[in-house]
Amino acid sequence: QKEVEQDPGPLSVPEGAIVSLNCTYSNSAFQYFMWYRQYSRKGPELLMYTYSSGNKEDGRFTAQVDKSSKYISLFIRDSQPSDSATYLCAMGGTQGGSEKLVFGKGTKLTVNP
Amino acid sequence: EAEVAQSPRYKITEKSQAVAFWCDPISGHATLYWYRQILGQGPELLVQFQDESVVDDSQLPKDRFSAERLKGVDSTLKIQPAELGDSAMYLCASSLGIGPSASDTQYFGPGTRLTVL
């Protein structure tokens, strides 16, 4: 079992839809959780950062972390064609002082006008 | 806004040749990371530097890969000899420190796409 599991999709939705992206993980040592957005042929860019359990909202984006279930989610409201990208979950925790991030495979999202 | 710079953006090479990638992190960022991202996969850490010292290179294939960060600023990743399986995106990232706080989140460069023929 991989440390981080993420459904690669692809996921295709109409403009304005609510999008739900998810990851599960197995390592209970993970303390902080991130979502990155990666456009084609570009490097990942940080979207959301969450430390421990709970919700965080930033504009149209909401990140949720449920450490008891080892499950994290990213919700995108009122999705736009410009949201079309691959979304990568990433997580990390104290590992001997080296804060190594472990990434999911990424979910490819297409928002159709 | 400060960005992580990488060059070249694209590199095509033949098997058994040597290749090198360069990264200039965001100014003031002490921690620098090199990742490899195979198509359809998430990035996987190859090596992490704190200033000029290697913190983690457990996943770096040391028989053919080398990385250095002289003077603790920019960094070079080298592959010699390149193999077909090395075709991937090589990403550089930097962060202020190595702690778990939000200020230590990693910022990625645009990557170097390597194709080995």
Image (cartoon, rainbow, N blue to C red):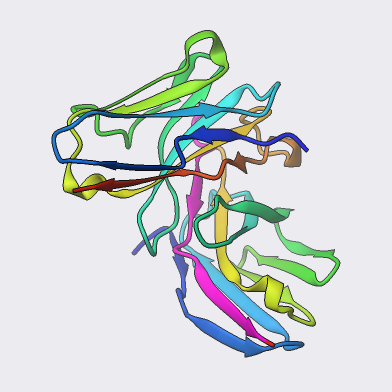
Q: Residue furthest right?
A: A59
Tell me the residue at 46%/27% (across/down).
B22
Q: Position of residue A39 (x, y in %)?
A: 57, 61
Q: Is residue A101 visible?
A: yes
Q: Position of residue B19 (x, y in %)?
A: 29, 30
Residue B55 is situated, as x and y percent measured from the top left of the image, at: 46, 23
Q: Is residue B27 left or right of residue A88?
A: right
Instruction: Give the vertical position of A78 relative to B117 (above or below).
Output: below
Establish if A71 lies above or below A52.
below
Q: Nearer the viewer, residue A34 or B110?
A: B110
Q: A25 or A49, which is in the foreground?
A: A49
Nearer to me, B12 or A58: B12
Asked if residue A69 can be seen in this view, the reply is no
Residue that appears at 86% across and 67% down: A59
- The residue at 49%/23% (across/down) is B49
The image shows residue B54 at horizontal and vertical percentages of 44, 20
Magenta-colored span: A95-112
Q: In the image, is residue B101 above or below residue A14?
A: above
Q: Is residue A46 magenta?
A: no
Quadrant location of the N terminus of chain B?
A: top right
